[in-house]
Amino acid sequence: MKKSKIIIILTVSFILGGCSLQSAGSKSEELGIQCLKDAQYEEAVSYFESAIEADIELETSYRGIGIAYLNLGKYEDAIDAFNKALGKALGKIGELEIDICYYKAVAQFKNKDMQGAIETYTSLIEYDGKNKESYYLRATAYLNQEKLELAKADFDAAISKDKDAYDMYINIYENLCEHGYEKEGAEYLNKAKNRLEKSGKNNLYLGRVNYYLKDYEAAKSNLEAAIKEGKKEGYLYLGQVFDKLEDTQTAQSNYSKYIENIKKSAEVYNSLGESLLKEKNYTGALQVFQSGIALKDEEFDKKLKFNEIITYEYLLEFKTAKEKMEEYLNLYPDDETAKREYEFLKTR
């Protein structure tokens, strides 16, 4: 599935610098952190504001408010909070300040302030030019400005920092494809393929690269070899290959093996649900999508929730689909496809 290509995991593991959690302000901050973990973002803001009123841990509390607003889609408020957090750093630059800058750039990107995001990533690159993520993320902003050559220069810089970061090659390909540059994206896949074939060591990534290059038979062979080598995560990608080969039964079997052998995964539940949709097994697909949603995986939550709504439509449960879409649009107000779907649902 296509995912947002801003590859930052928005964690809530705060860097508290070993401070005590005994005072009222610190207790409020602790409760705010827990609310973030529980996706209770409005409550989190309230607790962090209480901590700020107590004049304790201002930098991390403003950071917490920023993260809460970011998840609520209030991007300008998030940027303001992150700026206030940085203002409390008093000129020092450490892990916490770098972390805040990354969050700030995400908020700027989501607020469609590409130039602001570029400037923030540029500052991060100037501070630490060895970090491949900063180059990659700045490239995504350049792509959104349709500045292909600048984006490619940053993608190249990102890869130069770690030529064996094969996830990066794949992410670059998907990112370029989303902007209509499939040919340019394939060039990065072929670079990865050449490197993998020379090393002869990683059937898992070679299979994934061949999958994106649409060489499904080669991908199947690579991934089956990877699984025999003990890389059970290959079941997910092998399932996706069989879906492309229109063998949905074998695809679903591989997804199930991944869940049995590796873990419950939102990505796998989404792939399995989409495979069941192809077979018009709408009841089964709904159950699978809801199992994925229950995992509260930020990266795949949006896709799973949208697929849940579509499945309710297939089941002709339009009232439920409309209610779910209203909840969805509260979380993702910028989703134009969802807005169009909602207009359709209002007529049912």
Image (cartoon, grey):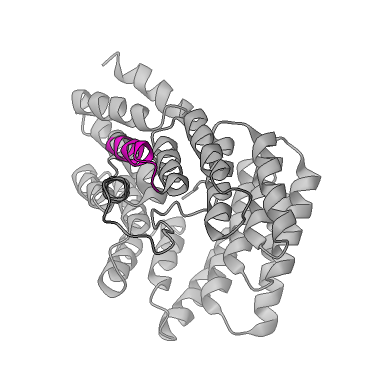
Q: Quadrant of the C terminus?
A: top left
- Percent coordinates x, y for residue 19 in the rendering: 38, 60
Q: Position of residue 232 (x, y in %)?
A: 38, 77
Q: Residue at x 27, y 66 (%)?
A: 256
Residue at (55% x, 72% y) in the render: 205
Asked whether the viewer can see residue 232, the reply is yes
Of residues 50 and 33, the one drawn nearer to the viewer in this rendering: 50
Predominant secondary structure, magenta span? helix
Q: How many marks?
A: 0
Quick one: which residue is furthest to the top in this view? 347
Name the foreground residue: 29 vs 285.
Answer: 29
Residue in view at x 73 percent, y 36 percent: 146
Residue 163 x/y as whole percent: 69, 71
Q: Which residue is nearer to you in this view: 60 or 173?
A: 60
User: Is residue 100 a member of the stretch shown in magenta?
Assistant: no
47 inside magenta stretch: yes
Residue 272 in which image quadrant: bottom left
Q: Residue at x 49, y 36 (%)?
A: 81
Front residue of 102 and 22? 22
Q: Residue 27: x percent and y percent?
A: 26, 49
Q: Can residue 176 be seen by looking at this rendering?
A: no
Quarter of the image holding residue 158?
Answer: bottom right
User: What span is colored magenta in the figure?
Assistant: 43-56
